[in-house]
Amino acid sequence: MKRKHQKILELIFARPISANVRWIDIETLLFELGAQIEEEEREGSRMLIKLFGEWRVFQRPHPTPTTDKGALASLRDWLFNNGVKP
């Protein structure tokens, strides 16, 4: 894993939850882990992501590029439960 992706993973697992994680950085990390991301957005900027053999829906943040803390906590739990750790 590239150092940039490792830093993003560390931000996702940081306690307290960081308020400065950009969604585009999360997308690149998920691609690195082998995720498929539905290109067309669903209603309300929802993104369909397949990783670890399961589909999850996440909200792409707008108008700011930073991901909210609830989405980061959900993502952290999903990654942790599938053996991904910083």
Image: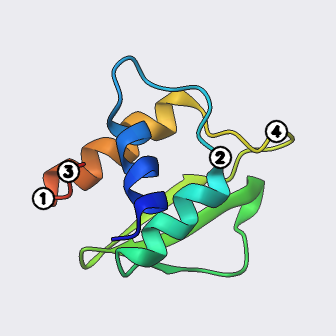
At 36% across and 81% down in the image, what residue appears?
Answer: 34
Q: Position of residue 79 (x, y in %)?
A: 26, 54
Seen in the image, is 24 located left or right of residue 10?
A: right
Residue assigned mark 3: 85
Which circle marks residue 83 in the picture? 1
User: How crowded is the residue under tag 2: few (<14 C-alpha within 10 Å), some, or many (20+)?
Assistant: some
Of residues 7 and 48, the one drawn nearer to the viewer in this rendering: 7
Position of residue 53 relative to residue 10, above or below, is below
Q: Position of residue 23 (x, y in %)?
A: 64, 52
Q: Amino acid at mark 1?
A: Gly
- Comes first in the chain, label 1 or label 4: 4
Are circles 1 and 2 on residues that touch, CB within 8 Å?
no
User: How crowded is the residue under tag 3: few (<14 C-alpha within 10 Å), some, or many (20+)?
Assistant: few
Are circles 3 and 1 on residues that touch, CB within 8 Å?
yes
Q: Secondary structure at mark 4?
A: loop
Q: Nearer the viewer, mark 4 or mark 2?
A: 2
Residue assigned mark 4: 64
- Farthest residue to the front: give it: 3
- Comes first in the chain, label 1 or label 2: 2
Alpha carbon separation for disc pair 4 and 3: 27 Å
Viewport quadrant of the N terminus = bottom left
At 81% across and 44% down in the image, what residue appears?
Answer: 62
